[in-house]
Amino acid sequence: MGAIAPRVGFSWDIFGTENTVIFGGAGRYYDRNNFNTTVDELSRTINPVGVFRFSPDGTPRRGLPTVAFDESYLTRDGLLQLLASNPETGLPELLVTKNNTKPPVNDQFSFGVRQRLGVFQASVTGSYQRGRNGYTYLFATRNNAGQGGCCDGAALGTLRSLGYSNALIGFDGLDTRYKALFVTLDKNYTASSGWGLNIAYTLGKAERNGGDLFSLDEITPDDYGWRPTVGDERHRLVLSGIVDLPLGFQFSTLTTLGSGQAYNVVDASDGFEPGQREFTAAYPDKNCIAGVFAFCEVNLTLANRQKLFGTGNEVEFAVDVLNAFNNKNGAGFDEFINRSATPDPDLLQPATLENASRLLTLPRRIQFRVGYRF
């Protein structure tokens, strides 16, 4: 109800020659929350998911009760015995959703110009997007009338008497924003010219507040502050080209170069309570093409197409070299800082391949293809 999404766009051929065209648009787009986000309110009461918190000595941790760990708890029978003997552990969380939760909405605006330059066509486009009403969960049991850390002992006691370990409230308060400049240069392939080229460059900045599905480290998503979104990349250049060679051969490439995608960083050097942590982002070290880019992938193809005599059909043989220069593009870097840790400070290491947990691209590989056209 009320999710009206108007959209408008225009294009204007200024001189009526198709050489210079101005274009733009604006629109509102609504989405829906993931099904499990809102159904958890009911499903977790039907199929409860218990939470066990263990510690060496069984003392409370951040206001939540713990159980002194024992090796028997590594088995199902051990956990069942613990459930029977300790009514304060293994309880499910209560997740509640407001009846008037707003659907996510995104407003988008763009404006650009296309210009013909001889055999090329160039375009420059500016874009802005603003997203609101993203869904996340917040603690309902914070200390100091909802302004402190988790969790208030009296509130937890009431919840445990009702069969729950804690309560989380759904909140439609995640925000995003994105600004970008797109620049393209195109020359379409034609048999008469024997070559084609596309260059696409993106200068972008994506930001957000809050956490993900759970924003439990601060009181509200706004308290996180704006920071780069995971995957934000300032610069990305994509080159694709094709050229005819003698004897029916054809060479082509698809090359992607990027400045590196952002990943979240949490600095807990000043503490772990609301207002003490700093939420920011970091980017991988630039390790290819003389330290200019952090992401490099070059794919090359050599193909040969020949007509079958007397049939008009064609057979094509091709070899692809994927990630031709065997560039290693890392991901999964260390996302936590605690400079006050003792005895050895837990410092964020540089985002190099040595401390990446995975690679975004596969190593260099070669594949052979045969195609038949009729």
Image (tube, rainbow, N blue to C red):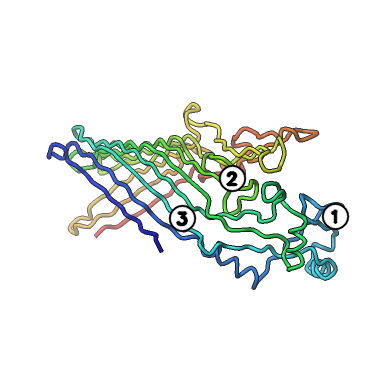
Measuring from the top left, give residue 81's x and y in whole percent: 83, 69
Query: Which type of secondary structure does the marked residue at label 1 adopt?
Result: loop
- Judging by the rendered image, the residue that carries numbered circle 3 is 104
Q: Residue at 38% across / 46% down in the picture? A: 319
Q: Give the mark nearest the N terminus, 3 or 1.
A: 1
Residue 141 shows in this picture: yes
Q: Is residue 265 left or right of residue 65?
A: left
Q: Earlier in the sequence, mark 3 or mark 2?
A: 3
Residue 372, x across and y down, in percent: 29, 57
Of residues 65 and 346, the one drawn nearer to the viewer in this rendering: 65
Between marks 2 and 1, how big is the CA–CA gap?
A: 36 Å
Task: Estimate the x, y position of residue 15 in percent, counting from the top left.
Answer: 13, 36
Whether 291 is drawn above or below 237: the answer is above
Q: Looking at the image, which is closer to me, 141 or 215?
A: 141
- Report the disc number at residue 358: 2
Q: CA distance from mark 3 to mark 2?
A: 32 Å
Is 189 drawn above or below residue 34 in the view shown? above
Report helix, strand or loop for mark 2.
Answer: strand
